[in-house]
């Protein structure tokens, strides 16, 4: 049995603003132990990936960041497959392309374990056992979902009603009777009380062949474009894995529909493994706050804060700023470099309303953090003023920026840590810490970190126009120059 | 009648943290119209300064900043006297030295109008009328206080009980019966109801001679050292005014006592002018919030904020950061570059508890802002990292930093606006925007703005030690080189 975990790494996580942004989605959110949700999911996946391969469905924008996270997690996985979506087309299309890629790579009977990238599971052993039960049923051509035994009348989850008698010869797998959408509180209380309902964890197990057949039967408007998108994809492979960059025109034709609507609710071949494995869906700051034990007054504090008569608050300071709180209760406070959230605990779900407002007025804070991730490292805007802009640039070991030129701005570069090789017009120079150079407007230039530690460089830009779009790229090792 | 306003510019304003800091005291706080409390007080003083002179009692640390504020306010005052206290010794000593300085400059019968620097008065005409009544009584050797007709049972103010019959021949001036310290609420209600009590505004009017005599009689432990501190002061004069830097050893001997305890409550020569002039004491963020009309949901917002179902909140963002608020009510939120306050409206007075905690652990945020004021302009720390530190330096027109040297750090300077003359070791160079220079550790250097607009310069410091105390000053036009 080859189990290929497929991690669906999507979802902006607007309820986890201001840490989650469009360009820094929820799976990248780091918990108190320093691991991101994605890293935890990836490690969990690696433990059941008996073929040594994990597939991740993401997009071009977060590809390098996602890959860095996986490398940093130091799993035992020997092969990492990336499928890059040119646009967001919901879970049915994401699972469709993954099924086609897995079929190509491992054959039609390879077993896929689909996992959202932003969930937590405490009991890894129970997770492993549930996956084994599901995989056996999947091998027989079944679709298997995972149902969590509910512990409270949660209104934020969908529910699965299951047949109390297990499938013949498969004690842990039951037939699904029906799916119930997110209920009102009264209904949720009934569902929890009757013992016949489980939370829908959004994880699935099936063979590539089964899923392709089910999509063909119930959602041909998803299947046909996704197969075409895979067939016409740009591919690259290395010894550690492969990348499938889907064709945009084909993929864009796929119907925007969830796998639940497209297949699960339509097929009569859907089953469930009831499980108890300390599962949680990190749906809001409230869920994050509940991951840590409170102090004597019910407060949970990360970063610098001074409190005076404060109770039951969650305070997360990401930015070294001092937060002073006086007399407040039941608040969620999340502070980042450029944006701050203050919400009451009982309104944690409504944080998405702020993001919607910011998006409507096209405010940067819905999309970007002050620190922006690039394939070669990061840059952070430290200050913008009239005719100048300052950045801290961090280049990873052996990485390099594109060979580029700006029409309107000159750049002063000062190395503060590591070493830099710099192409500046006709010159090639090497800089050590406390050395600087000047790139006039119109000069072709390139910044390279030839070393084995991060290069940290301060850039002061001067000019009458300082927009990020004043860049002409001539060569780029990350494929960012249009052919 | 020569009326010399004396502004007592003290008080850290710990209840207005994080905008007020030890090095940026409450009178410097700017209101919505862009004027600081000090500027408003200074302009009010200038309108009654019929001798064309205003005296300000402050300290060395905030002298240049205070002076800049006064110049910026563009009053009609022709002469500005500064008395610099070497240490904080409460209001009796501050008024004692001011009386001695005014006596020297204008004679014993000059009339002093003592004003705290951090109050607001809406009705300038009523203020002017009250001052004229007070001055006439002062001229006859009386001490006159100003009593505000109370509009609510405020527990944060002291009260003055007055004799309902005016002084013979002085219809607006009444004898003070007694002073009442800040009362409990029940008492305050009685005081407001009986019509015989006024709020003590902390403003006073008397001749220099009267005050010196009263201090001699009731508080010789204040008078004798303050006169000695004036006699042994370092003085400088210019066409626009004078500075009296009090002798530290002498002034330090003065008793630390308020003018209320030292004189007002002990003398039988104390009178009051009852007034209604839209007076307010800016005691807390609540008082500041009440200066502006709320929107339909009771919110008052300065700076960038997006609200969702928020009521009765005061939100002040000083730093261009986006504040998202969800479901909160009755909060005060004040955001600055390095510190954030969140308090409930009814606990606005307790903000000082946070400052006390920060002071106890010696956290910078009780004392300094990220932008630090210097005689020549400002510097702002933009980023600190391992072996580097970046600052934005703004030098005022025609100002210059001291001729100085650092043992441990090199500095990269990049001009982004204005022009700079730079002494760098043996060299003297001029820089325009987008030009840079490098100051190696151990080099004597000086930064001069020869122009008529602000010079803005980015400094990147590199070195193994980057503390502000690694500075050797050789020459300084602001007297900061010890003799």
Image (cartoon, coloured by chain):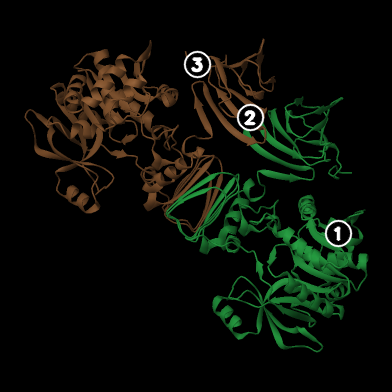
Chain colours: A brown, B green
Q: Is residue B170 above or below residue B299?
A: below
Mark 2 or mark 1, whichever is nearer to me: 2
Look at the numbered disc 1 and give the secondary structure of its residue. Answer: strand
Q: Which residue is mark 1?
A: B81
Per the model, the C-alpha gap separating discs 2 and 1 is 47 Å
Q: Are marks 2 and 3 on the same chain?
A: yes
Q: Which residue is mark 2?
A: A465
Q: Please state the horizontal and vertical placement of residue A93, each as a whole percent of the image.
A: 28, 26
Question: Which numbered disc covers residue B290?
Answer: none
Q: Please state the horizontal and vertical placement of residue B33, each as a whole percent of the image.
A: 66, 56
- Residue at 33% in and 14% down: A232
Is A252 left, or right, of A359 in this rendering? left
State which tag comes first along the sequence, 2 or 3. 2
| Residue B82 appearing in the image | yes
Q: Chain of mark 3?
A: A
Q: Which residue is mark 3?
A: A481
């Amino acid at each position: 049995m080859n189990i290929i975990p497929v991690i669906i790494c999507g979802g902006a996580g607007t309820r986890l603003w201001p840490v989650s942004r469009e360009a820094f989605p929820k799976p990248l959110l780091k918990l108190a132990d320093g691991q991101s949700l994605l890293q935890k999911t990836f490690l969990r996946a690696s433990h059941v990936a008996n073929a040594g391969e994990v597939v991740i469905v993401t997009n071009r924008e977060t590809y390098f960041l996602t890959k860095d996270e996986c490398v940093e997690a130091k799993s035992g996985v020997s092969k990492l497959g990336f499928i890059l979506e040119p646009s967001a087309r919901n879970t049915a299309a994401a699972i469709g392309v993954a099924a086609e890629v897995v079929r190509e790579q491992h054959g039609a009977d390879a077993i896929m374990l689909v996992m959202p990238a932003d969930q937590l599971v405490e009991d890894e052993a129970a997770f492993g056992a549930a996956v084994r039960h599901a995989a056996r049923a999947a091998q027989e051509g079944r679709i298997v979902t995972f149902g969590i035994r509910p512990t409270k009348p949660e209104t934020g989850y969908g529910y699965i009603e299951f047949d109390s008698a297990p499938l013949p010869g498969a004690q842990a797998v039951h037939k699904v009777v029906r799916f119930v959408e997110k209920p009102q509180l009264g209904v949720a209380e009934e569902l929890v009380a009757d013992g016949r309902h489980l939370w829908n964890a959004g994880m699935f197990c099936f063979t590539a062949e089964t899923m392709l057949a089910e999509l063909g039967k119930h959602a041909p408007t998803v299947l046909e474009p996704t197969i075409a998108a895979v067939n016409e994809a740009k591919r690259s492979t290395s010894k550690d894995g492969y990348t499938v960059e889907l064709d945009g025109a084909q993929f864009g034709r796929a119907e925007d529909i969830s796998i639940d609507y497209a297949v699960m609710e339509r097929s009569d071949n859907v089953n469930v493994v009831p499980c108890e494995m300390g599962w949680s869906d990190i749906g809001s700051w409230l869920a994050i706050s509940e991951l840590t034990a409170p102090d004597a007054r019910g407060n949970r504090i990360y970063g610098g804060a001074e409190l005076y008569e404060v109770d039951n608050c969650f305070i997360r300071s990401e930015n070294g700023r001092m937060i002073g709180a006086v007399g407040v209760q039941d608040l969620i406070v999340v502070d980042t470099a450029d944006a701050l959230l203050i919400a009451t605990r009982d309104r944690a779900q409504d944080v998405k309303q702020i993001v919607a407002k910011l998006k409507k007025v096209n405010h940067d804070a819905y999309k970007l953090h002050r620190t922006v991730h690039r394939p070669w490292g990061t840059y952070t805007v430290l200050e913008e003023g009239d005719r100048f802009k300052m950045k801290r640039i961090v280049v990873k070991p052996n990485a390099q920026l594109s060979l580029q030129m700006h029409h309107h701005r000159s750049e002063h570069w000062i190395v503060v840590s590591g070493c830099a090789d710099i192409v500046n017009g006709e010159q090639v120079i090497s800089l050590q810490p406390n050395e600087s150079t000047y790139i006039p407007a119109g000069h072709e230039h390139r910044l390279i970190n030839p070393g084995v530690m991060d290069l940290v460089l301060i850039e002061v830009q001067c000019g009458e126009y300082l927009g990020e779009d004043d860049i002409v790229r001539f060569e780029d090792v990350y494929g960012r120059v249009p052919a």
